[in-house]
Image: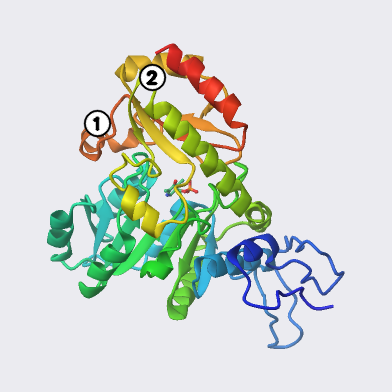
Amino acid sequence: MTENLSPGRPALETIAASHGVASDTAFGAVTPPLYMSSTYTFEGYDQPRAHDYGRSGNPSRDLLADALAKLEGGAGAVITSSGMAAIDLLLGQFGPDDLVLAPHDCYGGTYRLLNARAERRQFQVVFVDQSNDRALDAALEDVPALVLIETPSNPLMRIVDIAAIAAKAKSAGAAVAVDNTFLSPALQRPLTLGADYVIHSTTKYLNGHSDVIGGAIIAADPAQVEVLRKWANVVGSIGAPFDAWLTLRGLRTLFPRIERQQLTATVIANHLEHHAAVARVHYPGLKSHPGHTIARRQQRGYGAMLSFELVGGVEAVRRFISHVRMFTLAESLGGVESLVAHPATMTHADMGDEARRIAGISDGLLRLSVGLEDERDLIAGLDLGLSAC
Ligand SMILES: *Cc1c(COP(=O)(O)O)cnc(C)c1O
């Protein structure tokens, strides 16, 4: 029997749930097998098969790459050992004369990577508030080679208009990459909005179970896919087969997970917005959010990440953390379990005080990743923390 293909062009939900299902020709396994082998037999003299060595290709990893490329609407994908490795694979394409234009409030690890590489003169970097048209236009006059976008941003959930920035960047001659980790292709598809690359930390929503570190980069242009594939083999930043297999298993439930998680996140955001201990809530689904209109247009939902500021500042944070229940104090996001993080001392500690101040990340800010627990339990757990503030 051949692969159980959908009769028409499958919906994204179908791709996530079933890409590669029943495609095993050896034993007819319904679930795609895990291939751990590091090397592959040649059929004979000068006759390699589809795979020869595990750094250059692996069937389990390739299956995940194909699934993600289809979900994002790209020509292909490269699966890397982490989200940072995916970003670094892209950055490796640029040279000392190239300028990278990055968001001023990007993921802390991305900020650290960009600065570390720029300090070694591997390229130049400038950080800009991309929601500020004047600042963005001025930065584009310096002819960047790459514009990196992150929306919603971490941890303030700022929204930028991907289509508008991509159009401007294109006319300035820059390539455009979007870090889509916070929403996943279930809720946002940047390639359809004009981006050239999509980057993921598959560690987050795509795997969704907080048991794998992994990354992916998807390109719109087949030639760019080949270049990235070649470089992943050259530098060896590829993901492990078992990690790819687990991530594909996690991907099966991406849509129902994130849809349920964002429903609960909406309830929590509304609850927090009306709580006396909370000064501000940052959730794109709230009408009060400055990016709400753009988010409604460019996203299929508002996601399950939010952050909020406590009236009592850092002292209130301390009390909240020791009394909150249901939300585990940990970095990372996108898993089935709810987490709370304090960006100033955790995810964004390496940024330094000044850069955090410019990015608007206060010491009283807390970030939530909303999981799959019942919303009543989550709100009861939050209220224990809030009433201690
Ligand atoms: C976690 C994260 C990364 C880095 O991914 P790792 O898998 O931890 O290397 C990059 N961008 C965003 C937005 C992230 O949340």
Quarter occupied by residue 49: bottom right
User: Secondary structure beneath disc 1?
Assistant: helix
Residue 244: mark in rendering: none
Residue that carries the numbered disc 2 in the rendered image? 317
User: Does ligand 1 reach within 8 Å of label 1's beta carbon?
Assistant: no
Would residue 89 be seen by someone viewing this image from the given angle? yes
Q: Residues within 10 Å of mark 1 (few under 14, many from 20)?
A: some
Q: Residue at x 37, y 67 (%)?
A: 193
User: Secondary structure beneath disc 2?
Assistant: helix
Would residue 91 be seen by someone viewing this image from the given angle? no
Residue that carries the numbered disc 1 in the rendered image? 353
Image location of residue 296, percent across then percent down: 38, 53
Q: Closer to the camera: disc 1 or disc 2? A: 2
Q: On screen, 24 above or below 303?
A: below
Q: On screen, 77 above or below 245?
A: below
Q: Which amino acid type corresponds to the residue marked 2 in the rendered image?
A: Val
Q: Residue at x 65, y 70 (%)?
A: 53
* Number of numbered discs overlaid on the protein picture: 2
Image location of residue 244, percent across then percent down: 63, 57
In the rendered structure, which disc, 1 or 2, sits on the residue that comes first in sequence?
2
Image location of residue 103, percent across then percent down: 27, 51
Q: Which amino acid type corresponds to the residue marked 1 in the rendered image?
A: Asp
Image location of residue 32, percent across then percent down: 75, 64
Along the line of sight, which residue is nearer the eye, 149 or 280? 280
How are the residues colored? rainbow
- In the drawing, does residue 380 fall left or right of residue 40? left
Tell me the quadrant of the picture where the C terminus can be found. top left
Q: Are marks 1 and 2 in contact (CB under 8 Å)?
A: no
